[in-house]
Amino acid sequence: MTTTPSPLADLSDAGVAVWLDDLSRERLASGGLARLLEQQHVVGVTTNPTIFQKALEQGAAYEDQVRDLARRGVEVEEAVRALTTYDVRWACDVLRPVHDATDGVDGRVSIEVDPRLAHDAEATIAEARALWWLVDRPNLFIKIPATVAGLPAITACLAEGISVNVTLIFSLERYSAVMEAFLAGLEQARDAGIELTSIASVASFFVSRVDTEVDARLEKLDDATGQELSGQAAIANARLAYARFQEVTASERWQALSKAGARPQRPLWASTGVKNPAYDDTRYVVDLVAPQVVNTMPEATLRAVEDHGRIRGDTVTGTADDAQAVLDRLEAVGIDYDDVVAKLEANGVAAFENSWNELLAGVDEVMARA
């Protein structure tokens, strides 16, 4: 990795793992991903159905493989699994040196279970097992959504030794439930004699979408105080999540697992690309710097941080009281937090499901031409 001083280097030095929220066959084949590891301090990759859908509709990198699958009579859903797991396996191999150098902490690549299973725990567990077997790399994360049905699936997978990236977390209450599912899974793994050092997990707390939803509601209010709160909800929400993470890692329950070799479930800041052009394009990175967190960024955000990001050290620890005051003020002007996060979860699941269906349709179209 480069040792040239840079904001991304400063971010890494502050304890933030820099991950890329993107993957494509072209990025892998061109060596673009490897260069990001070498030059931009990237130590992990996340994917989701939307990312894969965009990758497959751009260029012809997948067409030969799709045609071969069609000629073999493979069903479209299995074809999509073959295509996506091929890319993720390749990416795992590119990141394997990082995984080895960090003793398994980083160098991770995430692949998501079929989002149509988000409300079916048993089907999610079965899909997670299948993806774990298909990719067959120790630095893989299986992404499971933090829906109510997802919680027992998270516990079950961790208990079997499957490393999990819990995705689509918006609410503090659900985040607490995710951490409970994590602890329960590790305890079951320990009791079954599974080596805890081989299990890893992150909890993906979505950021920018919270501001998008809250700001839209604030705009409808005839309240000057409310307008002053624009752009504050997402960072406050994430900072409160980090405070809960600190509480869990300070608990006796966690300390017992840690002594048995367990590693903490790091908070991961997702949805860090700024959606409001009026906001600084690095805000969901520079204002969420803390030890033991991951920030997964689309490439545009990664480049923006490297170009003009101002890393000011830890901007999260000790901010919980101020963050809670922001949420309290939002409630006082009529913003219903519970309704906001419930809507965001439902929209997130629906968006990934739509992207998955578009991915299936796109692959089916190419297969039909074979």
Image (cartoon, rainbow, N blue to C red):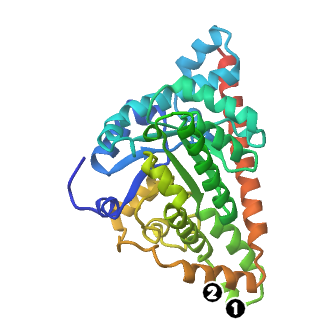
Give whichever of 89, 196 is nearer the camera. Answer: 196
Q: What residue is at 76 percent from the left and 61 percent from the top?
A: 342
Which quadrant of the structure image shows residue 139? top left
Quadrant (top left, top right, bottom left, bottom right) of the C terminus:
top right
Percent x, y for residue 318?
47, 78
Please say if 82 is above or below 101. Answer: above
Give whichever of 68, 257 is nearer the camera. Answer: 257
Please say if 145 is above or below 278. Answer: above
Using residue 78 as the reference point, say whether residue 45 is left or right of it.
Answer: left
Circles 2 and 1 in contact, beta carbons < 8 Å: yes
Q: Amino acid at mark 2?
A: Glu
Percent x, y for residue 191?
56, 38
Percent x, y for residue 156?
65, 38
Using residue 296 as the reference point, say whether residue 325 is left or right of it.
Answer: right
Measured Cα–Cα span from mark 2 to mark 1: 6 Å
| Total marks placed | 2
Please say if 137 is above or below 241. Answer: above
The label number, if any, that marks residue 258 in the structure image: none
| Helix, strand or loop status at disc 1 | helix
Can residue 319 be seen in the rendering of this structure?
Answer: yes
| Helix, strand or loop status at disc 2 | helix
Assess disc 2: are there few (<14), some (14-19) or many (≥20) residues with their C-alpha within 10 Å of its C-alpha: few
Residue found farthest to the top: 72
Can residue 269 be seen in the rendering of this structure?
Answer: no
Percent x, y for residue 69?
61, 14
To which residue does mark 1 refer?
Answer: 224
Give whichever of 17, 244 is nearer the camera. Answer: 244
The label number, if any, that marks residue 228 in the structure image: 2
Assess disc 1: are there few (<14), some (14-19) or many (≥20) residues with their C-alpha within 10 Å of its C-alpha: few
Q: What residue is at 57 percent from the left and 71 percent from the top?
A: 240
